[in-house]
Image: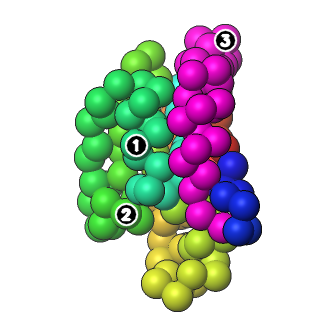
């Protein structure tokens, strides 16, 4: 998804001409079929435009102790909780984040999921696709 002909960056023409009109509904259908309780988007804030295209204007709520770019909760219809953070590659190798921040983010995600483990039918979906 990140290939733009130069090896990096967001492929706007590809997204606007192919993904958006034909595949954006795919993730909505996937959620309808799988019915996850939690969704973790490993896309970073740069993909919020796409999430808004897919789900409509999303409400975002910064998770306490983090910046909006590091970890936020987003409201997805019929999903108990959805979280959005940076892609693991960005967290692990980006200059902005160190091991402490990465571990803090992942530990918070694990904590949020653990709360739902008391729900016997909990399902989790993780995506870094778009």
Tell me if 74 is positioned left or right of 17 in this view: left
Q: CA distance from mark 2 to mark 1?
A: 14 Å
How far across and down, in percent of the image, does residue 45 sit? 41, 56
Asked where in the image residue 51 lies, by quadrant, the reply is top left
* Dot label at residue 33: 3
User: Where is 75 relative to 103, above or below?
Assistant: above
Tell me if 107 is positioned left or right of 72 in this view: right
Q: Residue at x 41, y 65 (%)?
A: 70
In what element is the residue under mark 2?
loop
Local crowd size for mark 3, using a 10 Å CA cut-off: few (<14), some (14–19), many (≥20): few
User: 27 or 19: which is nearer to us?
Assistant: 19
Asked where in the image residue 53 lies, by quadrant, the reply is top left
* Count of picture labels: 3
- Do the numbered discs 3 and 1 sit on residues whose CB atoms are within 8 Å? no
Closer to the chain start, of discs 3 and 2, is 3
- Determine which residue is flagged by label 2: 69
Is the stretch drawn in magenta largely helix, strand or loop? helix
- Determine which residue is flagged by label 1: 49
User: Where is 15 relative to 70, above or below?
Assistant: above
Magenta run includes residue 29:
yes
In what element is the residue under mark 3?
helix
Q: Residue at x 54, y 48 (%)?
A: 12
Which portion, as a residue range, is magenta? Answer: 8-36
User: Can see residue 35?
Assistant: no
User: Where is 117 relative to 55, above or below?
Assistant: below
Magenta run includes residue 80:
no
């Amino acid at each position: 998804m990140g290939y733009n002909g130069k090896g990096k960056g967001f492929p706007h023409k590809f997204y606007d001409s192919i993904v958006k009109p034909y595949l954006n509904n795919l993730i909505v259908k996937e959620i309808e079929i799988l019915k996850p309780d939690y969704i973790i988007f490993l896309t970073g804030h740069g993909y919020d435009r796409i999430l808004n295209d897919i789900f409509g204007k999303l409400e975002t709520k910064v998770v306490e102790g983090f910046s909006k770019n590091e970890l936020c909760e987003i409201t997805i219809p019929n999903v108990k909780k959805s979280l959005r953070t940076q892609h693991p590659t960005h967290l692990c190798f980006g200059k902005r984040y160190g091991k402490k921040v990465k571990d803090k983010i992942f530990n918070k995600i694990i904590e949020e999921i653990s709360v739902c483990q008391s729900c016997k039918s909990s399902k989790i979906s993780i995506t870094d696709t778009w």
